[in-house]
Amino acid sequence: MATIGDVVEVFDKLYPPELAESWDAVGLVCGDPSADVRKVYFCVDVVAATVDEALNWGADLLVAHHPLLLRGVTAIPTTTPKGRTLHRLIRAGAGLFVAHTNADSADPGVSDALAARLNLHSLRPLHPHAALSAPKDATGRDATGRDAIGRDAAGRDAAGDGRVGIGRIGVLPEPMTAGELAALAAKVLPATPGGVRLAGDPARVVRTVAVSGGAGDSYLGDATRAGVDAFLTADLRHHPASEHSEAGGPVLLDAAHWATEQPWLAQAAAALVSSVGAATVETFVSDLVTDPWTRAVVPG
């Protein structure tokens, strides 16, 4: 029998907390590390619907991508949605673990799962992790005196190919038009009411694609500098997308935030089973659509 602590140890190796952004809140949110765990439930968002599903299934531990408590709080009464959620988990004896931006940057991570949906190959990071790209001295330490995260003596990351960082850039198996790529993305990503939006010429030929799970308009510049033909992400805002397109940047594909991150759940579940054994834990990957938008209305 595995414990919550055993699962946390596995995920801390797969998604090192050191890779998380400074503003993030990752790791064990609630639960006793010494408690036995048999059923592990995976979701993007910790909301009432996913908690219902997890507890009805009998989950001992929930693994989520988005933090339940991202900002500091001074109280968690049941009169608030997050307070009710946390109290429900504690009363049920279920733990909660979060892997967020550390899972975004890890190799493999969130964007690897997204890239796999498009069958991209020859992957490299869209935005390499700062600790890996910072100048090092002769001992392999950066300006803060810290060892490079995940680097071995040869300066490679844990995968040996320097892929730690946000997003991925890859190559399609065969060139296709931007319109065909948008249709492919809509087909292979989990369905949401908003589908996939396209900014740019649908007839443009696409060979190289950048992807970034979750909100990605802060990486528009990275995609442009990389010279890719298209960039698939989520939550693109009007002005950054418009200015990017006016400047002649890559074609943009904007999908639902949840849809670009949900594919990672199966990857994380498989990695856990590979580490502790199928006879030790049972996993459940949620496909409940927790994107907040419930309908898109198009004229005609």
Image (cartoon, rainbow, N blue to C red):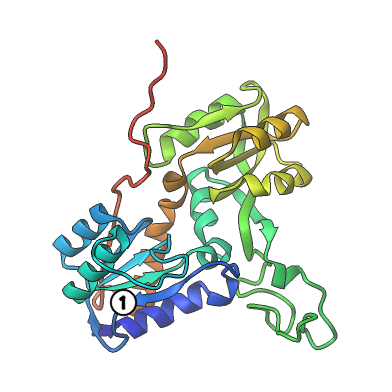
**Residue 20 to residue 12: above or below:** above
**Residue 6 to residue 231: above or below:** below
* Total marks placed: 1
**Residue 239 to residue 235: above or below:** above
The answer to whether residue 68 of the structure is visible from this angle is yes
Quadrant of the image occupied by residue 203: top right
Q: Residues within 10 Å of mark 1 (few under 14, many from 20)?
A: few
At label 1, which amino acid type do we have?
Answer: Gly
Q: Which residue sits at x=51%, y=72%?
A: 15
Q: Nearer the viewer, residue 187 or 24?
A: 24
Residue farthest along the right direction in this orientation: 138
Q: Position of residue 165 (x, y in %)?
A: 64, 62
> On the picture, is 274 further left or further right than 22?
left
**Residue 236 to residue 296: above or below:** below
User: Which quadrant, please, contains the C terminus?
Assistant: top left
| Residue ID for mark 1 | 277
Q: Position of residue 96 (x, y in %)?
A: 32, 71
Q: Which residue sits at x=58%, y=64%?
A: 105
The answer to whether residue 108 of the structure is visible from this angle is no
Say what secondary structure mark 1 lies in.
loop
User: Which quadrant, please, contains the N terminus?
Assistant: bottom left
Q: Nearer the viewer, residue 33 or 174?
A: 33
Q: Position of residue 159 (x, y in %)?
A: 60, 71
> On the picture, is 187 further left or further right than 35?
right
Q: Position of residue 38 (x, y in %)?
A: 22, 76
Quadrant of the image occupied by residue 151: bottom right
Q: Which residue sits at x=37%, y=42%?
A: 292
Q: Which residue sits at x=57%, y=35%?
A: 253
